[in-house]
Amino acid sequence: KQEVTQIPAALSVPEGENLVLNCSFTDSAIYNLQWFRQDPGKGLTSLLLIQSSQREQTSGRLNASLDKSSGRSTLYIAASQPGDSATYLCAVGKAGGTSYGKLTFGQGTILTVHP
Amino acid sequence: GAVVSQHPSRVICKSGTSVKIECRSLDFQATTMFWYRQFPKKSLMLMATSNEGSKATYEQGVEKDKFLINHASLTLSTLTVTSAHPEDSSFYICSARATGLYGYTFGSGTRLTVV
């Protein structure tokens, strides 16, 4: 059974700092890994998607890496802004079989960026 | 592109009544949609996989008679919480994947409160 762990559970930083969110998973047989943002009481917004054959993806100030062999992914946020404050979720999509397409989520990292 | 609309965003119902939540893919067809449940300050837990034209596949521990899923068309899946109890109060989110895209698009979620 796939287990996804995110560290830290919460993070508070001053505006402008670069930060790293960590995600680890126990089963390396993944289809893809996706990072999401969730604002309080809202749905999920996809930030970055990394296919199992890829090592990293970048979008603006965000960079996500994937090391499938070690079961790890990191989300790097450059020059953080108060608007980045949200919960960040890491989700792993299982490869193949009847479980294809199912996502297993981590518990999330609550990020607070203060001015 | 790849927008998923979920309705209603909030609903309050009395114990014993049934509530229907709709999930629509607005600009793509989705043969498969997923229903998740999120408890306060917890991550998302997959409840079931909704398959167009066939029965849904439920995760272990999810009561199929309580959480009725219907996927009657390629753009609409519904989740009906039957005989709702206060412990069914939660945040329910659906997702779908557009053909040709690798990531998942999520609806905005439905906050269900059973009183």
Image: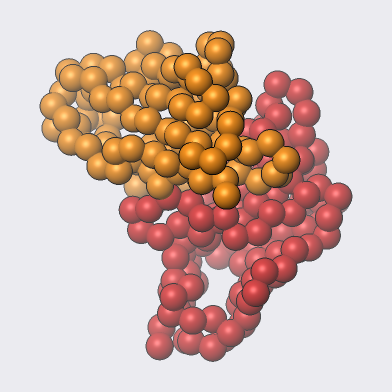
Chain colours: A red, B orange
Q: Which image quarter is the C terminus of chain A in?
A: bottom left
Q: Residue at the spot x=54%, y=81% of the render? A: A80
**Quadrant position of residue A113:** bottom left
At which x and y percent is residue A55? 83, 60
Looking at the image, which is closer to me, A19 or A52?
A52
At which x and y percent is residue B93? 43, 39
In the shown orientation, is residue B67 left or right of residue A8? left
Do we see residue B2 in this rendering? yes
At which x and y percent is residue A91? 62, 47
Q: Is residue A74 above or below residue A82?
A: above
Q: Is residue A16 above or below residue B59?
A: below
In the shown orientation, is residue B66 left or right of residue A91? left
Q: Is residue B96 above or below residue B61?
A: below
At which x and y percent is residue A71? 77, 51
Q: Residue at the spot x=40%, y=24% of the render? A: B78
Q: Which image quarter is the N terminus of chain A in?
A: top right
In the shown orientation, is residue B4 left or right of residue B30? left
Q: Residue at the spot x=52%, y=16% of the render? A: B56
Do we see residue B37 in this rendering? no
Q: Residue at the spot x=80%, y=38% of the render? A: A29
**Quadrant position of residue A93:** top right
How many discs mark residues in the rendered view? 0
Residue, far front: B27
**Quadrant position of residue B31:** top right
Looking at the image, which is closer to me, B110 or A4?
B110
